[in-house]
């Protein structure tokens, strides 16, 4: 491997050289496709944190993760107790989804690290979230409403604005299915937006959670719209979907753990394992829809 790397190092750009290093000698011998990378936003705690660790352990592609602050500390925490993971595979960038300028800077950094001429975004997890659990209209608060939509709905829209250009186009050469399997990734690129079952209007039999329900219904609409755009731009090489992870033991849901049956309250580690499994299994036939952790569709 080292001799092969040294033989190409003089003529290969640094970013691509690093990517080739991650793939290994077998993939190098057939390296005729654009290299893949992944995005997790945000990743400082909860699902995003564990998802980043999971991708580093189960795939062979680099990961860009994001945090609102202390990117050095977040990277250190993500890599803790992962001795077999090359730290160079992980870059943590500063992003606040309520501040578009931070998203623009992160996209510019991503373009420098992974030039689109030789790289493409293959897995994108757009998962920002906040919850204000209003039980009646009298509890609605303007600042909470705008904050909820800014993070849950507008945030994913702005991430899509600046990062979907990195997704493969119809003309992009992707790894073969067997190469994708070896890399630990699905055969098509996937953009996942984090939704929730309560974002389904047809499934709403309890009411409440006005801002959260509405913001997640918006996420479902955004995901469908984005996928329709990708159909024209990328064909079957990229798709968008929405996803419901179940109730996960994170800070967002902590107030409601007591009301959830133990077998339905998931650890972040279990939740991300199920999420990645669904991403790999739904295929392009499942594009534009919302799926739950069991791989079952949630109707709008």
Image (cartoon, rainbow, N blue to C red):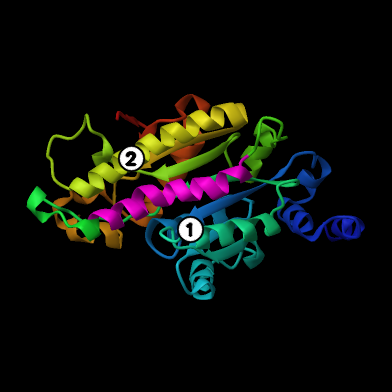
Front one among 116 and 14: 116
Q: Which residue is depicted at the point 83% across and 43% down?
A: 29
Front one among 125 and 134: 134
Tell me the mark number nearer the camera, choosing from 2 and 1: 1
Location of residue 7 (image quadrant): bottom right
* SS for callout 1: helix
Front one among 163 and 60: 163
Front one among 123 and 270: 123
- Residue 100's disc is 1
Other-residue count near label 2 (Cα within 10 Å), few / some / many at <14 / 14–19 / ≥20: some
Left or right of 281? Residue 182 is: right
Q: Is residue 241 visible?
A: yes
Quarter of the C terminus within the rendering: top left
Give the image location of residue 269, x and y in percent. 40, 55
Of callouts 2 and 1, which one flags the residue occurring earlier in the amino acid sequence? 1
Q: Which residue is depicted at the point 70% across and 47% down?
A: 116
Left or right of 89? Residue 132 is: left
Say whether residue 101 is magenta.
no
Give the image location of residue 104, x and y in percent. 56, 58
Which SS does the magenta portion mostly show? helix
- Residue 218's disc is 2
Judged from this view, the residue extending furthest toward the top is 285
Quarter of the N terminus within the rendering: bottom right
Q: Is residue 235 above or below residue 263?
A: above
Give the image location of residue 291, x and y in percent. 37, 35
Magenta segment boundaries in residue numbering: 145-167
Q: Which residue is depicted at the point 54% across and 52% down?
A: 39
Q: Which residue is depicted at the point 73% across and 42% down?
A: 34
| Cα gap from disc 2 to disc 1, whole angstroms | 19 Å
Other-residue count near label 1 (Cα within 10 Å), few / some / many at <14 / 14–19 / ≥20: some
Left or right of 251? Residue 268 is: right
């Amino acid at each position: 491997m080292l001799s092969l790397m040294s033989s190409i190092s003089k003529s290969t750009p640094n970013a691509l050289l690093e990517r080739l290093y991650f793939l290994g000698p077998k993939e190098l011998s057939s390296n005729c496709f654009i290299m893949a990378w992944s995005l997790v936003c945000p990743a400082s705690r909860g699902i995003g944190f564990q998802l980043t660790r999971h991708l580093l352990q189960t795939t062979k592609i680099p990961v860009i993760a994001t945090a609102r602050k202390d990117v050095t500390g977040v990277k250190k925490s993500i890599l803790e107790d992962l001795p077999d993971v090359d730290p160079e595979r992980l870059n943590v960038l500063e992003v606040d989804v309520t501040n578009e300028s931070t998203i623009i800077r992160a996209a510019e950094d991503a373009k420098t690290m992974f030039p689109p001429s030789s790289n493409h975004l293959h897995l994108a997890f757009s998962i920002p979230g906040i919850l204000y659990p209003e039980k009646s209209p009298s509890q609605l608060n303007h600042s909470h409403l705008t904050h909820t939509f800014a993070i849950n709905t507008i945030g994913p829209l702005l991430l899509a604005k600046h990062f979907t250009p990195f997704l493969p186009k119809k003309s992009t050469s992707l790894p073969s299915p067997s190469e994708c399997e070896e890399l630990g990734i699905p055969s098509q690129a996937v953009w996942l937006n984090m939704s929730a079952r309560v974002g389904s209007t047809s499934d709403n039999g309890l009411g409440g959670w006005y801002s959260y329900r509405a913001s997640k219904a918006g996420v479902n609409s955004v995901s469908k719209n984005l996928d329709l755009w990708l159909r024209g731009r990328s064909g079957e090489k990229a798709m968008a979907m929405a996803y419901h992870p179940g109730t996960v033991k994170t800070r967002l849901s902590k107030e409601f753990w007591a009301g959830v049956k133990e077998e339905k309250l998931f650890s972040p580690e279990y939740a991300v394992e199920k999420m990645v499994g669904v991403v790999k299994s739904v295929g392009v036939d499942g594009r534009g829809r919302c799926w739950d952790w069991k791989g079952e569709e949630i109707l709008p």
